[in-house]
Image (cartoon, rainbow, N blue to C red):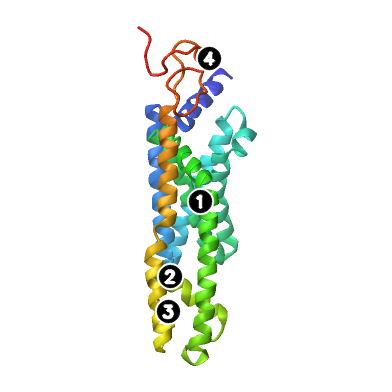
Amino acid sequence: MDSNNDWRQRLYVMIFQSDTTAGRRFDGILLLIILASLVIVMLDSIDQIHQNYADVLAYIEWGFTLVFLIEYGLRLYCSPKPLRYAFSFYGLVDLLAIVPGILALYYSDAQYLLIIRIIRMLRIFRVLKLSPYLKQANYLMAALRGSKQKIVVFLLSVCTLVTVFGTLMYVIEGPEHGFTSIPKGIYWAIVTLTTVGFGDIVPKTPLGQVISSLVMITGYSIIAVPTGIFSAELASAMRGEQLQHDCPVCKKDSHEPNAAFCSRCGNNLFKKLE
């Protein structure tokens, strides 16, 4: 009984503990297998390769599915709380790597769902210990929250512009020049305002070309607006985080962003104790 528990403990350390040599080796091999399976799926999507090597690729894919199924079973076996692992984020990700492969055995159209396995690459954060860097995403979220109202107003203004320009072009150019409806004109205005310029609809009249020039100039003028709004909010969020310090005396951790002295004890927030 003790040997069985000892085996499960070793297995748990190797599979779940990425800070050990065995754990890093296990996750590294698993990541290589995941990458290989993704390459097989991509190759299978090429028609010429699929026609010549469909059976070989299918057998290889079933082999990968079997490996992932065994790995999932081992995780359930050695986990102290199997249900907790099964319904955890990574447990569901591991399950998603298996289900498409099983479905592909019965439904040929399900083979492209195998690309879902790329989600398992999230485990690289365990292997390379990148999780502390994910905390920097808080700056991005704070910037998005701070700029949300400004960006919404900007998007509403853009929607108004493309509606006005699209309607004008429908009236001026008409169906004979490709502007068969107001939505078609709005589509042209969006493509032109964003400086994409597909060229599938082109104004022919002089007045239409003048308006088209105005739309292009307006597009260059406003295209950097959301970037500027977000950048300003991001800089503000990072600056606010840098200015928030714990008081070295009373340890109070909530101060105004620009505060230099503690509001509780009056000590300098930036001066360290001797």
Q: Residue furthest left?
A: 274
Residue under circle 4? 264
* Residue 48 in sight from this viewpoint: no
Residue under circle 3? 211
| Mark toward the viewer: 4 or 2 | 4
Q: Earlier in the sequence, mark 2 or mark 1?
A: 1
The percent position of residue 227, horizontal first and vertical second, equals 41, 53
Check disc 3 and report its element: helix, strand or loop: helix
Check disc 2 and report its element: helix, strand or loop: helix
The percent position of residue 133, horizontal first and vertical second, equals 41, 35
Do the CB atoms of the residues marked 2 and 1 lie less than 8 Å apart?
no
Marks 4 and 2, how far apart in space?
54 Å
Q: Earlier in the sequence, mark 3 or mark 4?
A: 3
Marks 3 and 2, how far apart in space?
11 Å
Q: Earlier in the sequence, mark 4 or mark 1?
A: 1
Residue under circle 2? 193
- The quadrant holding residue 28 is top left
Q: Residue furthest right?
A: 83
Residue under circle 1? 65
